[in-house]
Image: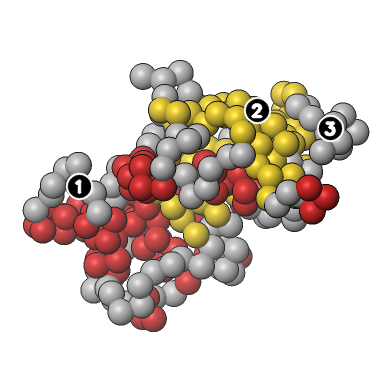
Amino acid sequence: MAEYLIETSELTKVYGQGHVAVHALRGIDLQVQAGEFVAIMGPSGSGKSTLMNILGCLDRPTSGRYLLDGQDVSRLSRNALAGVRNRKIGFVFQSYNLLPRLTALKNVMVPLLYNHDGRLSERQQRERAVAALEAVGLGDRLHHRPSELSGGEQQRVAIARALVNGPAILLADEPTGNLDTHSGEEIMQLLRRLNADGATIVMVTHSPEASAYAGRIIRLRDGWIDSDERDGQQEVVVASRESAPSP
């Protein structure tokens, strides 16, 4: 087993070339152990979304290495990255991304249709999806479509869908961004409970209230890791705008 579930080394991402080049990430060194709950924060343009896309195998770095569960995924082809995403990563998005014509149960079953490792029967797929929905408190909403669910319930369906394949890591991008305060708190309590049960969670958020549920907060600035805190205690300032080299 790999020492770290996530490990990046000198990770960079550059968009464009020459004088119009944008250095979104400038050399990220990051390690996340299995079972951690990490919040990634920072102002707009700090590199949060770029880093999340790379960690989620939705994009590849310009340079550097990214090891996911011991596998170097930095230079995999798009098809190979898609396979890694399906097997190892569960995504939770701000806008839920549910299919409007499908019930909660059918939405949760979608990732299982693309999981060719287990070759589950339709009955097994259904049983696994039901178990995932029951785990997020929606065992009585199996046959409701998204339009029949509240925002908080839709996000719970999205979390169940992210969990159904048993991923190594759960990536949450502003999971409370579209929710009212009460629903947002319920979602964060659910994520904390899932983490207590062993789920590894990396969450991008602007919300100090949401980040308070994480055990570790990483702050980005100008494409660098500016600080890394565990349980409110800053461990190290990795880089800053003052120390960063010119692009």
Residue 56: x and y, percent? Answer: 48, 45
Figure check: 201 above or below 143: above
Residue hosting label 3? 244
Instruction: Say left or right for 109 vs 21.
Output: left
Amino acid at circle 1: His
At a point 55% along the width and 29% down the height, the residue shown is: 65
Residue hosting label 1? 116
Mark 3 vs mark 2: which is more N-terminal?
2
At a point 36% along the width and 63% down the height, the residue shown is: 157
| Residue 202 visible to an observer of this rendering | no
Figure check: 26 above or below 141: above
Residue hosting label 2? 10
Secondary structure category for the residue under label 3:
loop
CA–CA distance between discs 2 and 1?
33 Å
Amino acid at circle 3: Ala
Instruction: Say left or right for 143 vs 147.
Output: left
> Do callouts 1 and 3 mark residues in contact (Cβ within 8 Å)?
no
Quadrant of the image occupied by residue 159: bottom left
At a point 24% along the width and 60% down the height, the residue shown is: 109
| Residue 239 visible to an observer of this rendering | yes
